[in-house]
Image (cartoon, helix red, strand yellow):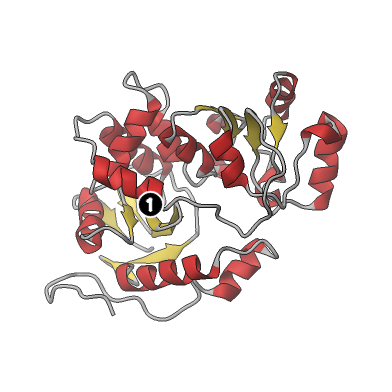
Amino acid sequence: MAKWKNNSPLEALSINETLGDLPTHYMKSGSSMRPKAQLQELGKFGNLLIPESYRGSPFEYDLWYNTNEIHTIRTWLWTDFLGRGIFVRVNSIKINNKLMKNIASSDIKIDEERIEKIISVLEDKYLLESNPKFYDKVIFPPGSNLLQKGIMNWHKVGKLIKEGYVIKPHPITAHLWIAKMRLDYGEENILSKREGGFELLMKCKEMAMCPNSEMGLIALLFKKKVSTVAVPVKTREKNHLTYEALYGAVAGQEQGSGIALRKILSSKRSGIIFNFDPDPEERLQRYLDNFWEFKITND
């Protein structure tokens, strides 16, 4: 049970299938499994930190829907983040975007110690094979579930291939999609989906991705050149992606995207909480306090 103060409005999470539950992750990832120890550690952290509900609205794991409301919250949404963390959002693109842009544009002091801790625990998200070769330019597409939703700008992918990029398919990519990539862009330009993406990312100089992926955020932390191969967000509003608010907040910042991201990762009100933080309960409450004037309902 979480060690909340007696007057806290948060209720402890009951046992259910959620972060750290192996059957849950097997159904999501198939044979591409996460490191068991990492899952168990995150699962324990999530169970201690995340309540069943807050102000009458439930917390839901790894769920997304968009209402486009600007002052009403119906669900608190959360997912695992950067290996040792949790990322909390709400069910409206407009609310998420406004909060992240506000933090990124603020004069908050960057917490260098926390940033270094985040970087020090980064690792491959899946148990994969070693890479026999490394490349300067790599495209990291999403898995099959998002490829079939039409979020990829395949024309841009083709242009990047001509510029020397190779494609590293997501571990959860159906053979049909792999075959299509090989046919369209050449077998020599398509790497094995079974090879580790994190190691490739660490060795490359330039990378491209879609905003469902943490890979671009990691690349920004390491000051690599990052571009997107997703179609514009306005053309896929119903297919809004997991980290869209983060990428949108750091894009085009005069201070640089890497600095803007570091500000978000330094903020106690961003909804980004790691299991090494000494104050996870405070960080969750500070995030929830962003919405003290909002209408909260599960209707």
Q: Residue at x 73, y 24 (%)?
A: 161
Q: Residue at x 57, y 71 (%)?
A: 24
Name the spot of residue 132 as percent of width and height, x first: 72, 43
Q: Residue at x 25, y 52 (%)?
A: 287
**On-image quarter of the N terminus:** bottom left
State the SS at label 1. Answer: strand
Q: Badge 1 is on which residue?
A: 89
Residue 297: give x, y in percent of width and height: 32, 61
Q: Is residue 160 left or right of residue 20?
A: right
Residue 99 visible at all: no
Q: Position of residue 233 (x, y in %)?
A: 54, 32
Visible residue check, residue 272: yes
Horizontally, residue 185 falls left or right of residue 154, namely right
Image coordinates for residue 134, horizontal then vertical, percent: 66, 36
Locate residue 245 relative to residue 265 in the image: left or right: right
Relative to the observer, which residue lies in front, 74 or 229? Answer: 229
Q: Given the image, on which type of amino acid does mark 1 rest?
A: Arg
Residue 133 in the image: above or below residue 268:
above
Instruction: Residue at the far front: name it.
Output: 132
Q: Is residue 7 above or below residue 163?
A: below
